[in-house]
Image (cartoon, grey):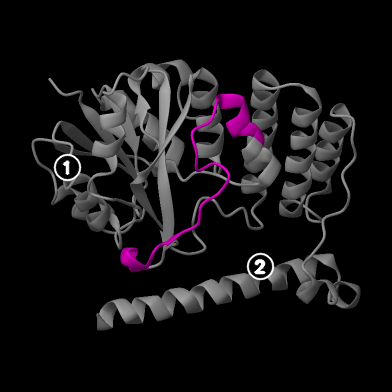
Amino acid sequence: MQPLVSILIPAYNAGAWIAETIQSAVRQTWPNKEIIIVDDGSSDGTLAIARRSAAADVSVVSQPNQGAAAARNHAYSLCHGDYVQWLDADDLLAPDKIAVQMAAALAGGSPRTLFSAAWGQFYHRPQKARFSPSPLWCSLPPAEWLLRKMEQNCFMQTACWLVSRELCAAAGPWDQRLLGDDDGEYFCRVLSASDGVQFLPDSKVYYRDSGSGRLSRVGSSDRKMDAHFLSMQLHLRHLRTLAGGERARAAGLRYLQLSLIYFYPERMDIVAAAQASAAELGGRLEPPRLERKYSWLRPIVGWRATKRLRLAAQGWKRTAARSADRLLARLA
């Protein structure tokens, strides 16, 4: 028998996208699959839309709102797959995404091999997704993968991975304390338990930029800042477990430095904690720098206002791009 693949979809207020996401799961050419959707207390029509897709191999359950990590843990507790495909409720899988990765898994690989895929970002038209290769788009041993991630501030999108049940069990549950970057921390644990990453460029994922409400956006929320810094501390712990020496020390310092902009100057308590982490690595962090097109404002209006204007300008730019793409999608 072909191994069973569980496609697990946590959903919260994803009514605009959930039907398309479910269809991308249903249309997978890998035949032996189950799809489990956990609605995390949505207040829009997400649950009703998902229930329209319920079938023998598509289960839909709901829970009170507890966050994405809790919804993922619930979905995993219900699944029976030999392999797990995590899929956020606004993203899409290419029809053969899982089939390409499973072909590699059945070609004699270890159940501890972690499979990854190419991913492209889009607004409303997946056929216009931008696939931008990063240093992580290759097969790598665990330590090298994590060093590159932290040295060069790059990541792999959640749906890229195909994870064996053995690796899921070794990694443990998603950390429900994390409001964002829970996927980054979770896959550090999966990576630590793996034999290495096998990258398959013909396996593709479409990552939707759905707006400022994305979990990955830290913004000005104190709760999100606290949770993000906790994820950073856990990342550093995983780095120490997998790698040592000067390169690992430098990677940790660079990771802290690049992330400081999330907290500065609103949360100087977190900045101080980050400085303490840097001191443990034998280094010191500098105040973050703004891009030249914003830095001239800082002496006039101050750091906080300049940062707010920077975030607002970036949001307006993305909103305009999304609106234009939505119009083109409707015209098409």
Q: Is residue 88 visible?
A: yes
Q: Amino acid at mark 2?
A: Leu
For the residues bearing labels 2 and 1, Cβ distance under 8 angstroms? no
Residue tagged 1: 29
Residue 188 in which image quadrant: top right
Give the extent of the magenta segment: 124-147
Residue tagged 2: 311
Could you classify mark 2 by the number of other residues whose Cα lies within 10 Å: few (under 14), some (14-19), or many (20 or more)? some
Give the quarter of the figure containing the C terminus: bottom left
Residue 220 in which image quadrant: bottom right
Location of residue 214 in the rendering, given as x and y in whole percent from the top left corner: 49, 56
Q: Residue at x 20, y 53 (%)?
A: 48
Q: Amino acid at mark 1?
A: Thr
Location of residue 124 in the rendering, given as x and y in whole percent from the top left corner: 35, 68
In the rendered view, does 113 fall on the left or right side of 47? right
Q: Secondary structure at mark 1?
A: loop
Q: Is residue 124 above or below residue 280?
A: below
Location of residue 179 in the rendering, given as x and y in whole percent from the top left corner: 54, 42
Q: Nearer the viewer, residue 135 or 150?
A: 135
In the rendered view, does 32 fall on the left or right side of 90? left
Q: Earlier in the sequence, mark 2 or mark 1?
A: 1
Marks 2 and 1 sit apart, C-alpha to C-alpha, by: 41 Å
- The label number, if any, that marks residue 89 in the structure image: none
Looking at the image, the residue that sits furthest to the left is 56
Q: Nearer the viewer, residue 67 or 281?
A: 281
Q: Is residue 126 magenta?
A: yes
Q: Residue at x 25, y 26 (%)?
A: 79
